[in-house]
Image (spheres, rainbow, N blue to C red):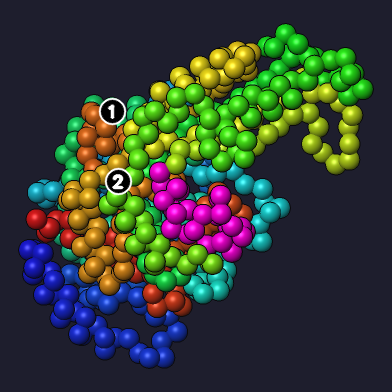
Amino acid sequence: MDIRELDRLNRRELIRGAAMLSAGAALMRPLPTIAADGPMAAIRKAAEAGKAASIQRIRDWIALPSIAAENLNMAEGAAFMAELARDAGFTNVEIVPTDGHPGVFGTIDVGAPRTLGIYFMYDVKQFDASEWSSPPLEGKMVDRPGFGRAIMGRGAVNQKGPEAAFLAALHAIRAAKAKLPVNIVLVCEGEEEIGSPHFRQIATKPNVLAALRKCEGIFIPFASQGQNGHVTVNLGSKGIIELELVASGEKWGRGPKKDVHSSLKAMVDSPAWRLVQALQTLVTRDGNTPAIDGWFENVRPLTTREKTLIREAAKAGDEAAQKQALGVTHWIDNLTYDDALIRLAQQPTVNIEGLVAGYTGPGGKTILPGRAVAKLDLRLVPNQTRAEAEQKLRAHLDKHGFTDVEMNVSGGYDPTEVAEDSRLVRSELATYKRLGVATSLNPRMAGSWPGVTFTAPPVSIAAAHFGIGHGSGAHAPDEYFLIDSTNPKVAGLVDATMGFAEFLYVLAAIK
């Protein structure tokens, strides 16, 4: 179907669909393109009929946490992901071994002229159940003020809820006996939360690589809406390196090789202070700017257009709500909101995730630790690379006299960029427009995902995020994904499902 025909159909659907919305409806649908005829009407009916099954699918998935950092349920998580793929209609599904944890690959080939890639992750972050208001593996329904009813649990929004909504779209299309408009290639991993150290092995496996290279592009399902329903379309994301720095008496040759009594500090060196001194050389005195030798020499500044896009997007943001959500009262260096957003996009970072040395339990324990560890993540921007950054960090430590400080890299990848005029991005923007969702373009999201695995050779296809719906709490307690929206601007589960269905048809039709 030509895109112009789809637009004409949607105008008819909008007129007829308006009759479907009663003013007293408890749950208001945010999409003005609610279909009353054509394939989308049958797909929506199937999505609504399959809603309970979709919720149960998310709940079952939440109940099986695969945590790569703890080597927990990794084989089970891959097997569950493979079964989800088969159940949604993927064929030739295989669990792909790597030197680390396995991934999953599958395809749906309907003989369509175009093929779309989908990236899933089945792993989640660690959690402390005592910090949650609802058990993190039970997937209970909770009220979220300003949004509606949501399912709460580890992985609910990052990424099992959005991914399950995409699978629900495939179920609905099949149940409606509609023809899938594109072929689909599914590539999944279980190590995203530790920096995807072996994902390239999955993507470049010969049969996987051959399938990916046929794709118009690939996206990760994403719950992208805030309270005002606005969506930011990101044209890239920062790269990342995850690592730890270790100072020890054993490697240093000074200080104790094991914990000793703290009274000995007057005559014995401290590995913990050694680590603190090494860390301080990595940033400016306020901790806000990387000071690693040569760190900025390849950084590509944002262009004037990119800065303009950010300032325009800032107008749709809610600065006060964002500060409240983050628990902050000022932006870094007392910047204005839009200047802080510009810095967020263009600045590489050196962040301390955690510091561990000696005793951290209740009360005191007078020891001098023999070993201290700092967990770091380094966010990279174009044109930095992981290889360059690792080399520069090691060289910096050595130059400043910290040759003994160990540097253990666990994962990471380069930044991702996608062209604004790529068919993938144009299809996203066209779909959001058809759904009546306000959008803005953002040059780069501050978070990271291994999209560069697809955008770089040998795959070399566009990669991005797409989706409507809402969730919050990724990597934090009380993570949730919205199911029943009471906010007319924000999609619940069924509308998020329909958003993915709409996208498939737009990608198939767009020029």
Observer-nearest of 373 and 342: 342
Q: Which mark is residue 303?
A: 2
Q: Does residue 206 sit above or below 379 in this rendering?
A: above
Observer-nearest of 310 and 426: 310
Contact (Cβ within 8 Å) of mark 1 with mark 2: no
Highlighted magenta segment, given as a residue range = 322-346
Can you see residue 28?
Answer: yes
In the drawing, does residue 53 fall left or right of residue 194?
A: left
* SS majority, magenta: helix
Residue positioned 71% across, 32% down in the render: 356
Q: Does residue 161 sit above or below 206 in this rendering?
A: below
Examine the structure image and report whether residue 231 is included in the region drawn in magenta.
no
Q: Which mark is residue 59?
A: none
Can you see residue 139?
Answer: no
- Amino acid on which disc 1 is placed: Thr
In the drawing, does residue 327 fall left or right of residue 258?
A: left
Residue positioned 40% across, 62% down in the render: 314
Callout 2 crowding tier (Cα within 10 Å): few <14, some 14–19, many ≥20: few
